[in-house]
Image (spheres, rainbow, N blue to C red):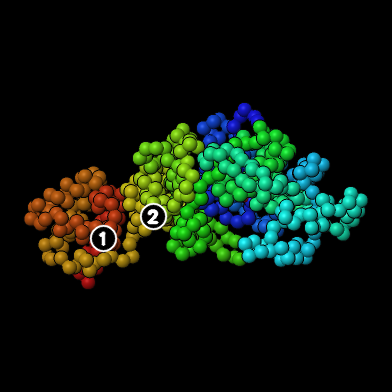
Amino acid sequence: MSDTVRVRFAPSPTGGLHLGGIRTVLYNYLFAKQNNGKFIVRIEDTDQTRFVAGAEEYIFNCLKWIGLEPDESPIHGGNYGPYRQSERKEIYKKYAEQLIKDGFAYYAFDTPVELEKMRHDFKTEHNPSQQYDHNVRMKMCNSLTLSADEVNKLLSNKEVKSVIRIKMPEKKIVSFTDLIRGEISFDTSVVDDKVLLKADGMPTYHLAVVVDDYLMKITHAFRGEEWLPSAPVHVLLWKYLFGLDQMPQWAHLPLILGSSGKLSKRDGLKYGFPVLAMNWLDPKTGVMANGFKELGFVPEAFINFLALLGWNDGTEQEIFSLEELIEKFSIERIHAAGAKFDYEKAKWFNHEWLKKLTATDLKEKVAAILSAQSIETKDNSYLCNVIDLVKDRCILLTDFYEQSLFFFKTPEQFDTESILSKWDESKKEFFIDWQIQLMNLPTWTSSALESNFKELAQQKNIKQGDLLLPLRIMLVGRKFGPPVFQIAELLEKKETISRIKTVLANLNS
Ligand code: GLU
């Protein structure tokens, strides 16, 4: 194994990238960066039947959005390419043939009809779908049951389809030490003779993952718990092909749980939250699945809550930047049990991050949200001032639209009813006089505005508190928003006075 830490994320480009996939990326990335190692993305696209157009590009777009850029990948290059398994087809065959030569694998010529018949004929009450394994392999059409001549004849016949299968040993215990779960053992008798090389010459995942992890000098492999049942096949392939001392150290990450069991698309649809990183338009069904990005999550929050789905640093700390995560991440503190996803908590993280990020950090994202609604954001410093004023009130980036619209557009409607319920002549006079005073106010700051407002209220013997709600509705249109004199400061003199006048005129009519 190489001295440099080399980890890989190995997605199959079959659709949108869900939370579990991104968390696998994140843990790989954190571990690599913490150890000055390399983070590699390898595209596992050997199953041509599951190929989905656009899925690979989508994966790289997601990585770009969250800012976890690979050191090596099909698009970033590297010394161990190609990084797309479909482009490595020629590499795998010799390893499969080596396994046959050494007696660890065999050719199988069974047709789909014969396979179906086997599953049916050998099924029992406890085993409703018989697998291709040590129980049946000697009754099938393969290089273990045919003579060498027959095998050669079949292999040279272009009409005959053949696969290569691993010959799983009987009654052997295969073990390995998982970095999260400790020692794990499997009884090989219950594992089937997995196909390693398919009839189209492509390897299956099992062969390709072992060969590529070896050739790409992978030192640690983090992958989802759902791959644990495949581990005995992989351990044996390592043993047969390269030696167990070459095998990467594995960490099988806990599942992310939804309402019942593994978090699924169905949970998302049922409870109205996304399970994908970014919007994914399924080219086959034309159905769009929502992503965290488009719903208004900032990548800092997305990474933060994902990191904590299965890991903590042992303290009460919940808010972590990427740099802190790189520093504090540790495999020992990943829990083996599944981690429950809570959308409300995810939103809490986003809110905390919106408070923490600066207007400069947020301005491009907010401008994009506003311009998607045809709102022009005026100059940069105005936009930044608005963001500073409203960001604590936003949970999602998309909330900036509602929270800041009145800074960019005069409200079309004013809640005059709420003003009228406590309106009288003295208040009306107050606002008529105040807007005249405003015209001559020498400094236009929230504190100057506030003291001027207070003074006039005192002179007129009206409680300031009774005047604030009408003022707010005059400037915002409704009963919400940040401190009202700060709003007026940003709106500036002309617009502030104009809004007061508009509402006064409405109240009179
Ligand atoms: N191609 C597998 C997947 O989709 C990768 C499993 C692994 O990391 O070994 O998820």
What residue appears at the point 28 percent right and 65 percent down from the top-left corner?
Answer: 414
**Percent x, y of residue 252:** 55, 44
Which one is earlier in the sequence, the residue at label 1 or at label 2?
2
Label 2 SS: helix
**Percent x, y of residue 63:** 56, 45
Tag nearer the camera, 1 or 2? 2
Q: Quadrant of the C terminus?
A: bottom left
Looking at the image, can residue 94 be seen?
no
What residue appears at the point 37 percent right and 50 percent down from the top-left corner?
Answer: 348
**Percent x, y of residue 332:** 48, 36
Which residue in the rendered view is the most extreme toward the bottom?
509
Q: Amino acid at mark 2?
A: Glu
Q: In this picture, is 472 found above or below 80?
A: below
Q: Quadrant of residue 427?
A: bottom left
**Percent x, y of residue 420:** 19, 68
Which residue is labeled 1 in the image?
Answer: 479
Which residue is labeled 2 in the image?
Answer: 344
Q: Is residue 410 left or right of residue 172?
A: left
Label 1 SS: loop
Q: Quadrant of the N terminus?
A: top right
Label 2 environment density (alpha carbons within 10 Å; few <14, some 14–19, many ≥20): few
Q: Is residue 152 left or right of residue 348?
A: right
Task: State the separation of the CA atoms marked 1 and 2.
Answer: 25 Å
Looking at the image, can residue 141 be seen?
yes
Q: Amino acid at mark 1?
A: Lys
What residue appears at the point 86 percent right and 53 percent down from the top-left corner?
Answer: 146
In the image, 324 versus 483, the foreground residue is 324
